[in-house]
Amino acid sequence: MISFVSHHIRADDVGAFAEYAIADERQVGLKPKNLSWAQAGVVPLVGLTNLESFYAAGAPWFDKSNVTVVVTSGQGGTGHIAVPMAKALGATTVISTASTDNVEWVKSLGADVVVDFTKETVWSTLPDDSVDVVYDNIGLPGNADAAMKALRVGGHLVMIQGDLSEHPKDGVSQTRILCKADDYRKLDTIAAMVDAGNISDVRVQNTWPLAQIGEAYNEQASGSVVGKVAVSIGSPPNATVQ
Amino acid sequence: MSLRCVGAALAATVAISGMACAGATSDLPSSMEAVVCVRELTQKNYSAMDDWLTPLDVPQPEKRQVLIKVVGSSVNPCDVDLVKSFEAMLARAFHKTLGFDVSGTIVAVGPDTDGRLKVGDEVWTDLGEMGLSSTEKIVEMGA
């Protein structure tokens, strides 16, 4: 089976793991002042992925009452941003999962219900036809079919990895998102959520210097990251040596 | 889809040096360190990447581009996929500098920008591909 990288590679010039990077002006937003440099360096890709996924699921949902959104993993890079973002986009109820040690933390991010995935699956807790949106940001085998049972007619399954359901429910959409990075206004939307205090707890599990990028990859590839793995590259402007 | 890497290479190999920028801080160095994909990694150990740090010319912003002095970044699942997948072959062939997430400050602005961004601005960005259709609606409404 061919596996696709879930993000489009830039078609010109250099990438981010460098002291200087070229960007198209249309994809560059102003950094929210409430985030540290490290925090601001871990949000854009996961934030845009979440935002596009929720847009594909009909967000913002302010014109609807009682919208229930499931985020299948609440403690990782996408998830810990997606939980408060779903609330900021008008979700009434957010249901997510975490390991035992992180259940209370994910609740503090704004989730109304957090299932301890070491004890049970989120699917076992959801009645059939009970949720409006499933944002599957982990893509475990069987998730799409399980999501179909939980979704009600008019609902949306959005996946960023894993396989879509081969047996979708009538009246339920399913979509696979590939994050696009072409519009700074989406970053501005995320920055506004930060400025408003909707997204306030951006978790950096560890920070590695550029010279140890391999260790940063090892940590990310371990599959058990809580929050994000950051890379520290240059000094911030006007940094004063204490 | 990611055969667009081919374009990356072409642009990267056309090094435009000494070209005047529309706006740049005066003290930019001429070279920098970057993590460049040099081979595919098939084992689940990425420590070898520590040796991928490579000196490169500091690029110049072209039309509608800005140059950012990078402060922070992160490793995403797609960054890991990139060095262990089929795409690593392409990335390696074109000496692709890795990484998508950026926080940093603008140090130079290229020609024909719209004036929104200025040297000194504190910014964030995802350097992913511009303008591609991102949403694959595989199945819609139970069709």
Image (tube, rainbow, N blue to C red):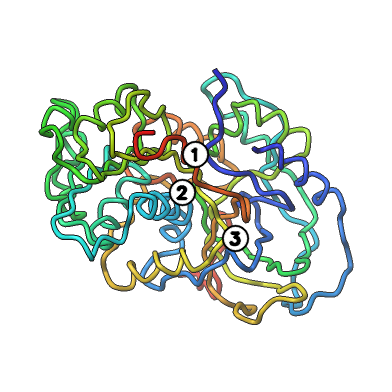
CA neighbours of label 2 inside 10 A, class few (<14), some (14 to 19), many (20+): many
Q: Are marks 2 and 3 on the same chain?
A: no
| Image disc number at residue A216 | 1
- In space, the residues marked 3 and 1 are separated at their CA atoms by 17 Å
Coordinates of residue B42 in the picture (x, y in percent):
60, 20
Check contact, mark 2 vs mark 1: CB within 8 A. yes
* CA neighbours of label 1 inside 10 A, class few (<14), some (14 to 19), many (20+): many
Residue B7, label in figure: none
Q: Crowding near pointer 3: few (<14 within 10 Å), some, many (20+)? A: many
Q: Secondary structure at mark 2?
A: strand
Give me the residue at 50% from left, 43% from top.
A178
| Circle 3: residue type | Val
Task: Of the two numbered discs 2 and 1 on the same chain, state the one appearing first in sequence.
Answer: 1
CA gap between label 2 and label 3 equals 13 Å
Residue sitting at 78 percent across and 64 percent down? B60
Q: Which residue is mark 2?
A: A230
Residue B91 in the image: above or below residue B126: above
Residue type for callout 1: Ala
What is the chain identity of the residue bearing mark 2?
Answer: A
Above or below — where is A94 with respect to A195? above
Q: Which chain is mark 3 on?
A: B
Q: CA distance from mark 2 to mark 1?
A: 7 Å
What residue sits right under mark 3 in the picture?
A: B70
Measuring from the top left, give residue A239's x and y in whole percent: 52, 71
Q: Is residue A168 left or right of residue A240?
A: left
Amino acid type at circle 2 is: Ala
Q: Position of residue B41 (x, y in %)?
A: 62, 24
Q: Residue at x 54, y 32 (%)?
A: B81
